[in-house]
Amino acid sequence: MASLSTEIPAAGPAISPAPVLSIVTPAYNEAESVRLLWEKISSVLNDSPWTFEVIYIDDGSSDNTWEKIRQLQADYPQGVRAFRLRRNFGKAAALSVGFSAARGDYVITMDADLQDEPGEIPSLMAKLEEGYDLVSGWKRERNDPLEKRLPSRLFNAVTRKISGLELHDFNCGLKAYRVEVVRELPLYGELHRYIPILAHAEGYRVTEIPVKHHAREFGISKYGLGRYFKGFLDLLTVAAITRFLQRPGHLFGGSGLVLGGLGFLILCYLTAVKLFLGAGIGQRPLLLFGVLLMLLGVQLISVGLVGELIVRKLGGHREAYQVRETLG
Ligand code: UDP
Ligand code: MG
């Protein structure tokens, strides 16, 4: 008779303990780079005080990036995790997948194309340990062609002006965060460029340090001038959220009250003319003007109220992506 085992059955494979650092790296057609990136990162971090995981997000690649990531994950199941998006959703969406998956206390974002230098991680971490919540890399010597560097300079200058945040380089893929900064960020479109602005508006302490930047070795850049166009429109959205439209009820309601009030006074005046002077007012242009101003005032106040309700409702997280597969 077989003896009954009294041992408690194992609850499946052991889950590795949460690492301290989560490196989040979006990859769109970067097949040649993904393994090299892991090797560079682990050679820097293996002798460091920090345990780490690298989270790859394949942003709908059409080359064999996912295959390469899959092999890498099979070789290093403790250190590599990966998500594959159903199609190309853009870098912002890819990053937000990584942000919600990160298990570390600190998150580092890094492009998958080897242009960012993993050797800078200790300097970024030193700044976080000083007490900053977000440390942005600054590609002081940027190794990209002039036609990328010039528009980028202009873009950074405009962004500084509109956002009021004094960073040199909003486009650097290499950044470090305390995990709470990125956990609930609603990111879509080109908004990843403005994470420091959004974080700054939330009251987080933001700084930057110069970092090394390499020329692209494999593959091609995914971004042309079009990104600045889209990026500029998204900048307006960010500025609206963080600076100008915190209280739409006040912005629109204020102008609505002034204009509507003016219309009301005009109509009072015309009523007095009619009642006390007995004059006809039906033909006066001022009548139309007063009525229009009153209507405009009511409209503006309503827009402001609707805006307030939307701002309150949409404060939370928004899914702007679809995950196809998950490893690790
Ligand atoms: N990327 C992405 N989705 C995209 C475009 C780019 O995940 O739709 C990734 C890309 O694979 C790279 C990083 O974002 O790791 C930065 O892109 P890229 O190197 O093309 O930009 P550049 O360095 O030329 O500014
Ligand atoms: Mg690049």
Image (cartoon, rainbow, N blue to C red):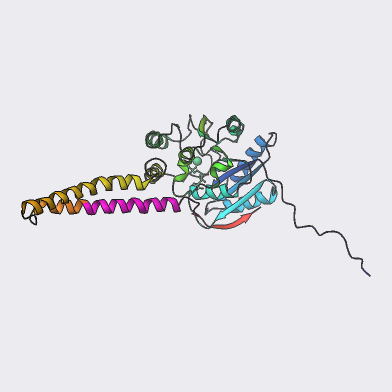
Q: Would you identify the image quadrant in which residue 147 lies?
A: top left
Q: Is residue 6 magenta?
A: no
Q: Is residue 314 above or below residue 117?
A: below
Depth check: give the residue in front, 148 or 16: 16
Asked if residue 316 lies in the magenta stretch, the reply is: yes
Residue 318 x, y percent position in the rendering: 49, 53
Which one is in front, 105 or 286? Answer: 286
Residue 78 spot, x, y in % from top left: 70, 47
Residue 122 versus residue 294 in the image, above or below: above
Give the extent of the magenta segment.
Answer: 294-319
Residue 221, can we see it? Answer: no
Viewer-side residue, 142 vs 145: 142
Is 27 displayed left or right of 301 in the figure?
A: right
Most common secondary structure along the magenta stretch = helix
From the viewer's perspective, is 112 left or right of 254?
Answer: right
57 or 238: nearer the viewer: 238
Q: Quadrant of the N terminus?
A: bottom right
- Residue 322, given in percent of the width and then of the height, sits at 53, 57
**Left/right of residue 204 with respect to residue 288 in the rendered view:** right
**Residue 137 visible in the shown view:** yes
Q: How many marks?
A: 0
Residue 247 percent across, percent down from the top left: 38, 45
